[in-house]
Each structure stands twice: as C-alpha cells, then as structure tokens.
Image (cartoon, helix red, strand yellow):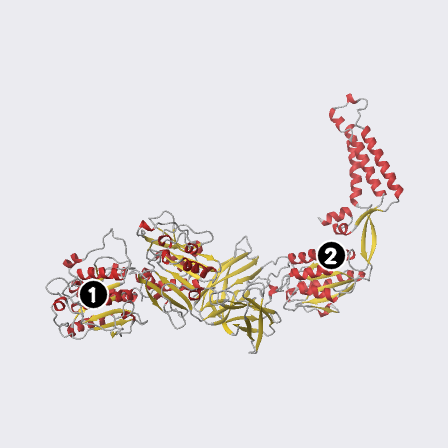
Amino acid sequence: MRTFERYLYRPVHPDEVLREFYFTRLAYSGHMYRGFAGSWSIDYPKADRQFMVGLKRLLDQLDAYDYDHALPATDPELFRFPFLYSVEVGYMALSPPEREALRRYLLAGGFWVIDDFWGSWEWANLERELSLLLPEYPIVDIPLDHPIFHCFYDVEEIIQVPNVGQGRYGGPTWEQDGFTPHVRGIFDEDGRLMVVINWNTDLGDAWEWAEDEWYPVRFSHYAYQMGVNFVVYAMSH
Amino acid sequence: MVGLFEFLFKYRPALFEEGRFTFVSPGWMQVAALLAGALLVFAAFSYRRPGAGAADRTAGADRLRWLPPVFRSLAIGVLVFCLLQPALVLSTVVPQETFVGVVVDDSRSMAMPDEAAAADGTRAGAVLEALSGESGSMLDRLAERFQVRLLAFGRSAERIESTEQLRFGRADSRIGEALVAASDELAGLPLSGLVLLSDGADSAPAELGDALLTLKAAGTPVYTVGVGRPRLRKDIEVSRVVAPRRVLEGSTVEVEVTLSQTGFGGRTVDLEVEDDGRIVNLEQVTFPRGGSAVTARVMFAANDEGAREFRFQVAGQPDEELLLNNERTALVEVLKRREKIFFFEGEPRDESKFLRRAVSQDENLHVVSMTRQAANKFYGMNFDEDTRRFEGFPTRREELFEYSGVILGSMEASFFTHDQMRMLVDFASQRGGGVLLLGGRRAFSEGGFAGTPLAELSPVVLYDRPADQGRPELMTDLRIDLTPQGRGHPATLLRDDRDEANELWPTLPPLSAYQRATELKAGATALLQAESPMVRDPMIVLAHHRIGRGRAIAFTPHDSWHWQMSADIPLEDQTHERLWRQMLRWLVSYVPDRIEVEADRDRFEPGNTVTLRATVRDEAFQEVNRAQVVAAIEQPSGEEVEVPLDWSVERDGEFVGTFTARESGLYRVEVDARSEGELLGVATSRFAVDELNEELFGAARRDSVLKRIASETGGRQVGLGQADRLVEDLSVSSEGTLVREARDLWDMPVLFLALVALLGGEWAVRRRLGMA
C-alpha cells in the first residue's frame, strides 16, 4: 500500500453514530493503475456514496452509514465490517499479510463482492490471487435459482453492464475480450457464499452514473437490483 | 421428665390421661374431712389478731408468725387427702381375652448394624431378641396378658407363626399398607392394638396419612417400637436427584444432586456421573462442616439418543456404615428431533445473520426467520414443507404456536397489532413457549414496549421513552461478566470446564447495547451483566423470568457477532456458536408439546401401579376434553399392552389410566389421541422398573414417622427395652375385652414428700421464732 494513497480514506467521523451496515471498500495492494493511486479506488468515492443513496431508499429499514468507507485488509477494524466491495481486481496483488487477514475475514463470516474487471487476462490475475487466498475452495458459477438472485429482487438473467463511457455513447457493452458477463462465487463447506465475482460487467459505474440522463436506465436498474440483493444476502446468510 | 413424673406420682402421665380420678372412702368420712377443713380455716384466721407481748417482738418475727399454723394445717390436709383414699379408675383388658398384633419390619434395612441393644449389633438381632419369647423379653411380657399374633411385612403384611420365618431381606417396606393389612387380618377379634417393630423406613409411594386415617377409623391404636439409631455415625447418601425427563440430543443436561452425610463434615468426595458405564462427569463436592446436606449442580452433555440411565454415585468411604445408598439413577430421554424456533427481525443486521449461522449446523434446532427489509417487505427463510408460510408476523395462534420458541429482534412495538402482542404473551404464558428478546435500537424501552402487552415479556424493568426522542444512544465498551447466578448455568457455560468457563467471560471482546437495562423485575434472574462508563449501575446483559407455563429471556447487546468476527478471536474458536446453541436449546427446553404423556415417576419397583397422565391440546393449545386417548405400553419383553386413558375431570385436557408393571426393565409408552376419529397427535414416554432400595435412603431410624403413626392412631412410641410400659399401655387401652380397675394413689411418693416438707418447714420456722 502506498503511503500517499491513505489520503483517500475518509475515516468515520467521530461524531457519527455507529451503524449496522457500512459499504466497505477493500483498499488492496496492486499494480500501479493509470498512473494514479491503486486500482482499488476506481470510481471511489462517488460510486459508493451513490449506491448508498439508492440502497437506503430501497432498503428503508437498513441502518446504513451514508458515506464511503474504505479500509485496507490489514486493518484489524476490517473485522467490524462484514461486507466488502472491490473493483478492478485484475490489478490486485495481495501481500501475504493482506492475504492472511482476508482469508481469516472470509472464513469467519465476511462477505466479499468483486466487480468491474474484464477479460481473460484480468480473470487470470484474480484466479491466481484467489487460489492463494482460498486454495481449498473452488470458484463456481452461481446458478440463477440461488437465493442471491431472489432474496429481495427476482433477477432472472445476468446482464452485461458497460462502463460509463460506452454506456452513454451506445458503444459495445464489453471490454477487452470479456464478451459474456458471469456471476461466480466461492462457497464454504456449509454452502455459504463467501465471495461473489461479477466478471465482465461494471455494476459500480451503473450506480455511479445512475443520475446521468445519458446512461441507460436499464443498466442502473439491474445494477441496483443486484447490489441490493448482495446486501440483503450478506446480512441474512 | 416422664420418669420423674412416674417417680413422684407412682404412674406415668399416660395412665392419668386414660383413667378417671376418684375417692373410694365412705361418704361420712368425706363430710368429716370438710368440717375439719372449716375448723382449720377458722384457726388460721385467729392467728391474724395480734397476741400478747406483740410489742416485744421484732417486726420481722411478727411477719413470720402465721407460717407454722399454715404448714401444720397443710400437713393435716395431706393426711386427710390420704385418708379419703384417692384412686385412679382405669379400664384394663381381661388377661388372655384380648389380642395384640405384633407387626415386624422384615425388610433389608433391618440388617443395618447400628443397634447396640442386640448381641450381633443389628436391628434384626435386636428385634429377634425382643421377640424371642424368653423370660423377660417383650414377647414374653405381652404373652402374659394378651393373645399375640405375629405378622411380618415388606411390601405387604402376612401372618407368621414364629420369628424363625423372619428373613429381613425384603426389598420394600410399606408401613402404612402393612398396618392396614394387619388391622384387617385381626378384624373381628377383641384387639387391644398393634405393636409395630420397625426402623421407620417407609418406601411406599403413597402418602402415609391415608393408611393412618383408616386405622384411626377402625379404632386400632398402633404402638411403635423403633429400632436402630436415630442417626448413623458415618454415612454418605445420594438423597435426591432432580433431572429433566427429556432433553435434546447434544444438550447440556443440568441435574441437581443432593448429598447427605453424617460424620463426614468438611470432607471432599467425588460425585461421578455415569452413562452406560462411561463416566461423563466428575464433580468434587465438599460437605459443609456444620450442615449435613449439600446440593451439587452437575452438568454433562447428553450426546447419545434414546432412553439413558444416568447413574450418580459417590465412592464408598473407608469407614462408611452403609454403601448401598451411595448411588441413584435417573432416566433421561435424549431426543433427536428439531425444535422449531421463529425468529422475527425488524431490520437487516449482522446480529441476526450470525445468530442464525451459529445454530445452522445444529440438527436439533430449526430456526425459521422473517426479516423486515423495507416497510411491509419481509424476507422469510428456512420455511419447509412442515411449516406454515405467512408474511410478516403470524396473525393466527395456530401459526405461531407450532413453534417452541420465538426470538424477537429489533422490532418496535407499534408494528404489532394489540392481538399480535397478546398472542405473543400467550405463546409464553399459555402455550409454554420460550421468548427471547434481543437487544437492538427498536427493542425494549427503545422500541416502545413499555405500556404494551410486550412489556410483560421483559425480565428487565422498562421505561417510557417518547418516540420523538430520536435515535437511542449506544452504550459501547461493555465488558461482560457472569453474575453469581450465571456461574455454571447451562446457557452461559462456554467451556466444558466450569472454572475455565467462568474466567472466559471478561476476556471476550467488549460489546455495545442500546438498552439501558439496569433493573430486574421481581422474580427475574440475571445471568450476565456489564459495567459501562455511561451508566452508573451494572447493565443487565442476560436475564430471564417465568411467564405462566413458559419463560422469557432478555439478551440486551446488539453485536454479539463480534465474538465470531473479531480479530482477537481465533478462527477455530466456537464461543459464539456455543453461546447461541446453548441459548436456543435453553429457550426451548421444557416447552410442552400438544400431546404429552408421563408416568407419575420415572422409576418404579416390580408390582408397582404406574399412573399414566396424558395432556391433550388442539393446534391453538386449547385443552381438549372430548378425545379418545389410548396408551400402548411396550414392556421389556416386547409384549404390548393397551391401556385406555379417561378424562380426569380434575383438569381440562388431562387423561389418566393405570397399569401394573410386573417386569423389570425399560417400558415405552405411546399415546394416540383422537377426536371424532381424527388424529390429534401422538406422544411417547418411557419409564423404568427395577429394585430401587428406597428404604436404604434415609436409613437411620425415622422417629418422626414412628411418632406420627403412634400419635395419629392413639398409640404411643416406646423403646425396645420398655416391654413393661408397652404391656401397661396396651392393658389400659379402650379397645378389647375390658374390666374396671381402681389403683390407689394415697401412697404416691409426692404425698409423703409434701408431708415431710411441710412438717420440716414448720419446725424450721418455729426455731427461727424461738418457739421450739
């Protein structure tokens, strides 16, 4: 983790009361991305805040923190927030301490949503990282009849959600060679979903640009449905 | 005291109670005595006038002047009383025309070696010597005056011809039944009374009072002769075992074992719990130095399904007098079934997720949950084909009452209708279910429970909190510890070793709570508490109380899931899982089923009458009286007997039937309840039949029992060496063939002593006054 990235964290304000739910973004170590900070911070913090606005409206009984909330894996405080979100994991390169903490976090009961990475090269990077993180648990496609597609909204098909640029201008929805979207996961031995992987899709951009009149509403609509389902599933399973 | 009375008055108080006082002198002598008395009074008055030379005497001497004539007068009075020939008129039996039944305890406890009066030191030896018939023995003295009939008893009484037929080996001694049987046996004969020779150990299941009433009605006084010492010198006894009849497989069974002792005060002994020959717990128990009994709370895991006989025993001590009372057995049915719990949660939160996850692998718990995600949008989980589906909170009793327990999460009271709140209270009080109230920002006072029916459920005192006060304040950094009542409680025992479990609590990561719960309701018990810098008094963390048939539990923190997720808790640590498994098992333990059947005890002796009691309720747990209930009893041999159970009339929904258990072994009862041909339900139960040796418990002579028998039937308690007294008491009985007899009282030593004292007193006063 680069020291200069820390300015990106917005700590929970001391006057802010503790909430039941925090949309926590994982600030992982990785390759330099687009000459700026780590790839973990893509769309941060706007996507996170924008998602919280929608989430609180849709799940009006959820006592959720209104703002963005990013933490590195090695921070012991991470264990107080059992929901985790990551993007651009094609550039992720976890250090051994990060790997150890994240493994422990997931096996203890944490839930990790991975989003916004494309193509076979980035998949290969994630697959390698996950094989080091949870070597004994395979990555599998999550069938559409799984509760994560039905616990709040009934999601009947997996849609490819494009990034804001391609979404606004009606370009192709894919990036690199990621033509087909997938929702994959890692289950523990009791059948509990620990990791949800949204590959070849960018839910984060759809949350972030949901208010943009040029961004197609069907993508935002789908992205919010999936996001709400992830939160409901994470807080009930 | 009685001896002193007898010395002074010649006869025992008992004879004065039985007899009538009279004077046997001629009438003229009594008139003369009255005249003499009048003269004496006149003479006494004459002394009141001052005599000559009074001025020469001292004032003190003048005051004593009247005493000599008084003493003299009283002495004369005593002599006159003797001359009038006072007498005690008694009704006594005609020798050899009246019968006495001698009823001898022939049970095993009579072999106890604690009777110093016997040559061999045993109770049996003492009885045999008393009944030997040799000159001076009790039997010999009785035979001089009565026709004696010998009877021996164990479970029942029967005539014996001689003491040689006594074996002192019977497993039972039922005193009440034996006395009634003896009275019946001798009915029709002029019976002076029964003489009971026993140590007072009564193993009858029925209350003694019924038998005593029968004897009283028949006018049969019972004279009891106690054998043995009223207190053993050195003995340890497992006096009582209180165990649940049923537990869920894998649960911690909590059993209360009372150990009594004499002569072992201050000693530490090992109390072993055995399950089928395997030691499942070993508890060290130290007897108090001053007291005699101590109650130990023993806990162990019941991991094997089926009817288990747990044996509780204390190893015999080297110098202990009786070893057979060092163990007792309890029958516990370990059930493999899924108890259904309904978890109603008002908001998505990690506490409910981790709670459900903690118990998800427990095959005996089935948690069905309903979580409010948005206004009027609920997410139901774990409903299956055996569970009625509904949205939100049930509106019908049948829907709610099919569960054994309810967990109420962070849900404000205003969500519920009044009927729903009432139904939840009835779930505990009438259905007998368990309700667990979890802490949260919308629970307890913060959820507006105060002033609603839900307040009845809370074991902690609630306060009014106006809805416009906004979000309640969160109290953080709560370090939780056990209260004295929480130590060793099955819900809070997070480690197998009790000391380790007690030390664990303060080391767990601190939690937080919205509830300012600092005051318990009357009758509630706190098991966990916490200190907080934000409140002055200790915060109540875990408390419970009974509500009608059921119970309600409060757990006030809202984030116990940190004990699962915290960075300070090792991944393999099972503290969180164990806490919630135990809590939910505790929640649903002892929750009644719709149809239930129980024998009146869990263990019987061969030949005992077993009373089966079934309770029948409908889906809404209303008792059903119009039902056909049949119990199929599977005996140890495999043979099945059907016993119809009838409505008891005493209680709604209660059906009763009896059965005589003749075979030793384990019995299984299955009750089938129908109403108008439709099956209401089935229930099973078990009981065991074995030699229980009940009379070896409390093996010292039970004077209280013997005294009660004697006093309630009009007899008396006498000692083994008091044959004369026994014969005398029986002779003046109001029963049998009687004749009147007057016994002189003029020669009572008390009269002679009074005479000597009065004359001696007069002489002493006269000397003082210079008159002698």
Image coordinates for residue B731, horizontal then vertical, percent: 78, 57
Cβ atoms under marks 1 and 2 closer than 8 Å: no
Asked if labels 1 and 2 share a chain, the reply is no
Q: Residues within 10 Å of mark 2 (few under 14, many from 20)?
A: few
In the picture, the disc for residue B111 is: none
Image coordinates for residue B330, horizontal then vertical, percent: 53, 67
Image coordinates for residue B234, horizontal then vertical, percent: 58, 59
Locate residue B412: give its quadrant: bottom left
Image-based side of B450 in relation to B90, left or right: left
Per the image, the residue denoted by label 2 is B722
Foreground of the two, B546 or B73: B546
- The amino acid on which the numbered mark 1 sits, given as a three-letter code, is Ser
**Numbered circles on residues, count:** 2
In the picture, the disc for residue A86 is: 1
Question: What is the chain letter for disc 1?
Answer: A
Quadrant where the image shows the C terminus of chain B: top right
SS assignment at label 1: strand
Q: Is residue B207 visible?
A: yes
Compared with B449, B377 (above or below) is below
Image coordinates for residue A234, horizontal then vertical, percent: 28, 65
Q: Is residue B135 visible?
A: no
